[in-house]
Each structure stands twice: as C-alpha cells, then as structure tokens.
C-alpha cells in the first residue's frame, strides 16, 4: 500500500511538472520570444485555458501527499518554510500576471504584467529545481522527524545545509534550462510566424544547456549522495530510466532539427518524467532522507497514514483522477491546434 | 509576540482575506446559472449580456480566490505542522478530496466558461457555467467538512503514537455538524452575491445607465436575497446554534456572555461583556428566549461559563461575543431590508423607490462583514481547542518555525495582499464602468 501511494504521489508530481512546466517555460521565454503585443497575447492565449488547471496538479499532489504521508507533509512543509512561502508569493504574482494583463489596454500596464509573469516563472523554475535538489541531497532531520533550513548557509554540503548550496543551485539551473526548452517547444507548436521561429530557436540553444546540465547533475548527485546508485544495483531494470533520459534527450534534438516540434515536445515531456522518475526510483523507500544520519531518514513506513483511510482513499482517488483526466482530454481537444488572433474577447 | 500568536495571526489574516473572494464566487456561480437558464428559457438576449457581465466579475474574483487560496492549503504544513501530523489521518482525506474533485472541475471548466462561449453550443456553455458552479460548491463542501471535523470530531480513533486515524469514512462525510454548517455557509455566500448583484443594479438605475440590465440585477438580487436570508436564519442558523449548544456548551455561554448558569436564560441583544467582573454592562435582553431557542423550553437550564473550568473557556470572549452578535444582528437586518424591497418589487414600485435603491446600493459591504463575523464565531468559539476536546491550539503550531520567520512571512503576506486588494478594486471599478453592454459595443 505504501509503495502504491509513493508511486501515485510521484505520478502526480511528474504530471504537474510536465503540464505546468510548459506554461512556466512559456513564461520564461515570454519577454524574449514574444516581442510585439500581439505575440505576447498569443503566448497568453496558448496557455490561457489550461495554466490554472495545470497548477491544480500541484495542489492535488500536495493534498494527496498530505493524505497519504501526513508526517512527511508536516515535516517538509515546516522545514522548507521560507522557500515555500516565496513559492506562494511567486505563484500569486504569476497568476495575476497572466489573468490581469489583458484587462487594461496600455503599454505600461501590460509591460508591467508581462515582466511579472516572466520573472516569477523564471524564479519558480529555479525554486522547484532547488527543492528537488534538497530532497535528493537530504535535510538535517532531527530525531523528532523535523528540521528547519535557512535560505542559505555557506553554499557547501555539510552538517548545516541551507536551501541553496552549490548542488541545489545546480539542480535549479537544470530545471530552468529544461523548462525553458519545454516551454519553447510548446510555444513553437501552438503558434505561427516570427514568434514560432524565435521559440524554435530558443529550443535549439537551450537544448545544449539541458544536455550539459543533465550530465553535470548526474555526476554531482553521485558525489553528493553516493547511495543513489544502490537501488539500481538491487533492481537492474531501473537502468532503463537513464537510458530513457538519454534517448528522449537525443530525440528532442533530432526531432527539432527535423522541424517536428510537436513530437519534440512529447520527447521533452518524456525527458522530464524520466528524470523525476529516476530521482524517485533512487530515493525509494525513503521519502525525505537525512543529510547526516541515515537512521533518521523519513521513509514510506514511518510517515504512512492509517491503512483504513488509505484503502478508502484509493477508491475515491481513482474516481477523481479519472474524472480529472477526462476534463483534461476534453479541454485539450477543444483548444487544440494553433492559437489565432484577433481573439474572442470575453 | 510569541511564535504561537504569530502563527495564529498568520492563518487568521490569510484565511479571512481569502474568504472575501470565494463567498462571492460561490454565490455568484449559482446566480450566473440562474441567468443562463433564464436566457435560454425566455430566449432573451439581455440575460446573456447579464451573465457575461457577471462572468467577468466572477473571473476576477475567482483569480484572487485561487491565488489567496493556495496558501491556505500550504499553511497546515508550514505553520501548523504538529497539528497536521496529529490530524492528517483524518483531514488529509477531505483536503485531498477537495483537490481531486473540486479544483480540477473548477479550473477546467472556468477556462471553458470564460474563453469558450463561441466554441460551444448554448447548452454546452450552460453546462460549463453549471460545472463551474458545482466545482465551487464541492470545494466549499470539503473545506467545511474539514472544519466541521475540527469542531465536532467523528469517525476517528487515537493511535498509540498519539495521532488520529480515520475509522469511518461516512461518519466523516456526514458529520451532522458539518451538514448544517455547510448549508448555513453556502446560504451566506448566496446572500453576499445577491447583495452585490442588487447593489450594482441599483447603482446603474440611480446613475440612469444600463437600465435594462440594472433592473435584471436588482430583481434577481432581491429575490435570491430574500429567499436565502430567510434560509440563513431558519432552518440553517437555528440548527447550527443548536449544534453549538449540544457539542460546545462552553462556546455557547461565551457567545452569549452568559457567565452564570441560568434556568430561563435571556437572549442578549446588546451589552458589553466585562470578563474581569464576569458581567454584562448596560444589557438589553429578551427574557427566557435563549432557553427557548436552544432547548425549545422557556425554563430550560443553559450552562454558563461558571460550569466549565477556566482553561477550557474560549480565550477571547469579547471578540467571540461581538462576532456572534454582529452576525446575528446583520442577518436580522438583511431579512427586514429585503422583505421591504421584495414587497416593493411585487407592487411594481421598487424601480421608482429611489430611497430603497440607495439602501440596496450601500448595503453590499454588510454581508461580507456578516460572513466574516460568522466564521470568526465558529473559529474563535472553537478555542482553546484546535480539534474540539481533543487537541489544543498551543500544541499545534510548527515548533521549528521561529517567531522571526513567522513575522517575516506574515508581513510579506500583508504587503502582497494590500497590492492584490488595490488591484482588485481597480479592476472591478473598470468592469462596472464598462457595464453589461454587448461585447461588440465595447
């Protein structure tokens, strides 16, 4: 049961990253790739009907994590207090940046909201990457299962790590690069004209930084937490994951050169999913490792909720997620194809 | 300031601010469905214009409701981690269900409702409006059920590690406290939306513009308002009060500032509680009414605060007392005001009665106050418990988050919410200025 919920929570997080990842990425390239007002409106149109729903996967992931692993939720949310609060503020600014930009016509207002949307998207990408970096590196858990990290200490990996150290910053940069490329491919599929061409070019050069940072981060992870390799030894089928990572990375490159950005976007989704899947695979059965003492690791076993609740939950959870997928497929089909302007203004 | 107080203020401030938005969207969701239904039934374009106008107001409110709502979900863990660990086995259910059932529904169909009118058939767009309404009410249900479990814990067992675990899913979902609280709360939301709709209509009529839309708004606002403000009192408010009397007798005594147990207890209309001297200054009371309302007998005994150990008294009796009396007082005034307005509407005089239109226009802030005061009554009344009778508030805050870190983010939220509030008022003013014209004319 514990393993099942571990997989389900991981799946929700992966879905969140793949989906909200493309609108975060669209935000990252917003100022650069879309120069004219109508181009920026096209980007907002391309993500308009779906971005809010994409973000809900984060809430559903958070809610399910709380439901299945209450102790993990309590410990990680209070321990990552400061970065989470900043993530909240950024999510707010980003949300109003998207929703309120087109309520007022006028270059000053719109430029302000464009910048809000773009800068908050960039920072969120880095924060999310740094968060994953923290989980892989481990946190200074106490015997009571709680910890607290300041934003940074000395940027080294040691007994008193901060949220930001060289490793989590590296993963943050990787997330930034990967989502830039992911968002650029999405924008390229959804638009036409010079905006599409610029998005395509962004995908081209960001691919190189993704590739380099992927290799660096894999090496760094082995150095920071040598035990990440253990599960691969125990379950050799896990080696399929890095193979998929590399395969999807090359597919992204090849398909983009072939001007098939649509399928390259799918490859990018597979890349993101396999990277996160690999991290989850390496962590298992830990859910939040201790940076210093492995016996204090939070694991599936010591954070899992009661078995009756989990059994009941499985029933409604499956119903709920199947319904949600239904809405999603309907919505994406309805708004499929390139976005067009002039817009149907509401 | 202690860390505990900061964590309490942190939650209180963010949740109070947040609920300014959903109370309108939940109520408006229903009224928009009514407008869309009228448009289809009467084949009348004007109702479509009205629905589109309110959809724009809805969208702005909804966006703010979402962005201020996400922090609520997070704060259980960030600021109240020991409580989350204690109660996660139970309230993890309702909170996760809200995410899975409500948020997906709302967010998917809101996009469709706002952006998709031209892509959908008339029926399709009606369904989009209906599903947005449904999503927001489902969301309200799970949140109220979460609170209801904290007010009246049911269907759980305490485990050897001290945390609670669910033992009966249906007891949690059908918590009698929660069902009445939900009805009372949703009715309150419709009242807010009705008052806002009537106020905007009255404003247009007094300004002598968009007269046709103005009349539709006033008519729907008054009719829905009068129905729901009566439902707010009876049966929902009445039953909610009896739930408090039955499950939280100390809270009832504090709400009424009843310091001494009394047979044939009076209902207090006015008076300032003096907790130090344990008395009420310059009281105006209806004799025996509290006993009657609570136990349906004139001479029934109502327990006063003296019947409970002092450490179990709500820790802010004056604020609780005032919150409760403001809620009830305003609720009573709403009924009176709307009955007069409905009478004028029925006689066909409402649109000529300038004085009534002025009253309707100026009344819209009061249901916000009443809804807020109602929630303050529920939450301050629950003190000193986080989970009534089981888990005290001072056990629940995150031990690892210091007062300094808590203050930092509390101030951050205050600044952020000030900015959001200014933006909100500015955008709503613009929409009112634009008015409910057909899209092409804008």
Image (cartoon, coloured by chain):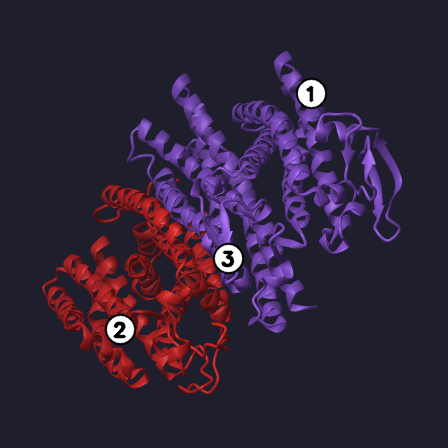
Chain colours: A red, B purple
Callout 3 secondary element: helix
Q: Please state the chain letter of the residue tagged with numbered disc 3 in the rendered image.
A: B
Residue A6 located left or right of residue B23: left
- When the figure is inspected, residue A107 is found, relative to residue A152, above or below; the finding is above
Residue at the disc numbered 2: A282
Q: Quadrant of the C terminus of chain A?
A: top left
The verdict on a common chain for dots 2 and 1 is no
Position in image of residue B421 (x %, y %) = 58, 52
- Give whichever of B212, B288 is nearer the camera: B288
- For residue B303, say whether it is visible: yes
Residue that label 1 marks? B340
- Mark 3 vs mark 1, foreground winner is 3
Mark 1 Cα shell of 10 Å, populated few (<14), some (14-19), many (≥20): some
Q: Which mark is residue B71?
A: 3
Label 3: few (<14), some (14–19) or many (≥20) C-alpha neighbours in 10 Å: many
* x and y percentages locating residue A244 in the rendered image: 15, 68
Label 1: which secondary element: helix
For the point 40% across and 42% down, which residue is it?
Answer: B106
């Amino acid at each position: 049961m514990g393993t099942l919920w571990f997989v389900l929570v991981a799946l929700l997080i992966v879905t969140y990253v793949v989906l909200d990842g493309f609108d975060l990425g669209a935000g990252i390239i917003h100022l650069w790739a879309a120069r004219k007002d109508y181009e920026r409106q096209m980007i907002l149109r391309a993500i308009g009907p779906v971005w809010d729903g994409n973000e809900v996967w984060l809430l559903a992931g958070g809610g399910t994590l709380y439901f299945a692993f209450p102790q993990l939720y309590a410990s990680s949310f209070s321990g990552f207090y400061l970065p989470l609060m900043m993530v909240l503020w950024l999510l707010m600014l980003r949300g109003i940046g998207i929703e309120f930009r087109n309520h007022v016509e006028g270059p000053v207002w719109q430029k302000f909201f464009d910048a809000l949307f773009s800068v908050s998207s960039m920072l969120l990408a880095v924060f999310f990457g740094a968060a994953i970096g923290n989980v892989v590196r481990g946190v200074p858990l106490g015997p009571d299962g709680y910890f607290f990290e300041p934003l940074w200490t000395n940027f080294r990996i040691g007994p008193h790590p901060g949220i930001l150290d060289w490793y989590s910053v590296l993963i943050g940069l990787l997330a930034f690069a990967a989502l830039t490329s992911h968002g650029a491919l999405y924008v390229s599929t959804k638009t036409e004209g010079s905006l599409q061409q610029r998005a395509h070019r962004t995908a081209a050069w960001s691919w190189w930084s993704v590739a380099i940072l992927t290799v660096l981060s894999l090496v760094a992870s082995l150095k920071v937490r040598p035990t990440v390799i253990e599960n691969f030894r125990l379950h050799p089928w896990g080696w399929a994951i890095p193979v998929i990572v590399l395969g999807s990375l090359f597919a992204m490159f090849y398909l983009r050169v072939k001007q098939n950005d649509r399928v390259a976007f799918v490859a990018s989704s597979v890349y993101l999913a396999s990277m996160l899947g690999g991290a989850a695979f390496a962590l298992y059965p830990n859910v939040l490792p201790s940076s210093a003492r492995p016996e204090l690791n939070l694991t599936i076993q010591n954070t899992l909720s009661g078995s009756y609740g989990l059994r009941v939950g499985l029933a409604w959870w499956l119903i709920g997620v199947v319904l949600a997928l239904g809405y999603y497929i309907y919505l994406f089909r309805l708004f499929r194809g390139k976005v067009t302007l002039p817009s149907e203004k509401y | 300031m202690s860390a505990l107080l900061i964590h309490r203020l942190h939650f209180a401030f963010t949740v109070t601010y947040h609920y300014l938005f959903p109370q309108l969207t939940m109520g408006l969701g229903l009224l928009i469905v009514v407008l869309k239904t009228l448009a289809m039934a009467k084949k009348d374009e004007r109702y479509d214009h009205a629905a589109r106008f309110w959809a724009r107001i809805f969208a702005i409110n909804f966006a703010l409701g979402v962005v201020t709502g996400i922090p609520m979900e997070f704060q259980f863990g960030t600021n109240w981690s020991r409580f989350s660990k204690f109660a996660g086995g139970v309230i993890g259910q309702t909170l996760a269900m809200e995410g899975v059932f409500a948020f997906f529904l709302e967010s998917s169909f809101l996009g469709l409702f706002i952006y998709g009118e031209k892509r959908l058939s008339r029926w399709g767009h009606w369904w989009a409006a209906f599903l947005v309404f449904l999503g927001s009410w489902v969301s309200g249900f799970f949140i109220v059920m979460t609170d209801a479990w904290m007010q009246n814990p049911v269907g759980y067992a305490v485990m050897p590690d001290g945390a609670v675990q669910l033992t009966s899913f249906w007891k949690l979902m059908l918590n009698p406290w929660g069902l009445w609280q939900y009805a009372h709360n949703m009715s309150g939301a419709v009242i807010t939306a009705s008052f806002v709709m009537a106020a905007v209509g009255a404003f247009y009529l007094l300004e002598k513009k968009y007269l046709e839309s103005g009349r539709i708004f006033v008519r729907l606002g008054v009719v829905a308002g009068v129905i729901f403000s009566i439902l707010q009192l009876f049966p929902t408010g009445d039953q909610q009060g009896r739930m408090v009397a039955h499950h939280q007798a100390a809270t009832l005594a504090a709400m009424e500032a009843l310091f001494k147990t009394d047979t044939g207890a009076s209902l207090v209309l006015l008076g300032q509680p003096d907790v130090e001297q344990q008395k009420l200054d310059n009281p105006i009371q209806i004799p025996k009414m509290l006993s009657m309302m609570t136990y349906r007998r004139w001479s029934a005994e109502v327990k006063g605060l003296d019947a409970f150990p002092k450490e179990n008294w709500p820790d802010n009796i004056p604020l609780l007392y005032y919150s409760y009396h403001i809620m009830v007082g305003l609720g009573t005034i709403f009924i009176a005001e709307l009955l007069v307005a409905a009478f004028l509407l029925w006689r066909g005089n409402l649109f000529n009665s300038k004085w009534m239109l002025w009253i309707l226009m100026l009344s819209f802030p009061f249901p916000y106050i009443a809804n807020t005061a109602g929630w303050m009554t529920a939450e301050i009344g629950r003190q000193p418990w986080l989970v009534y009778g089981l888990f005290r508030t001072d056990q629940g805050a995150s031990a690892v988050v210091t007062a300094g870190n808590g203050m930092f983010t509390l101030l951050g939220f205050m600044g952020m919410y000030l900015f959001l509030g200014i933006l909100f008022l500015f955008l709503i003013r613009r929409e009112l200025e634009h008015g409910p014209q057909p899209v092409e004319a804008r």
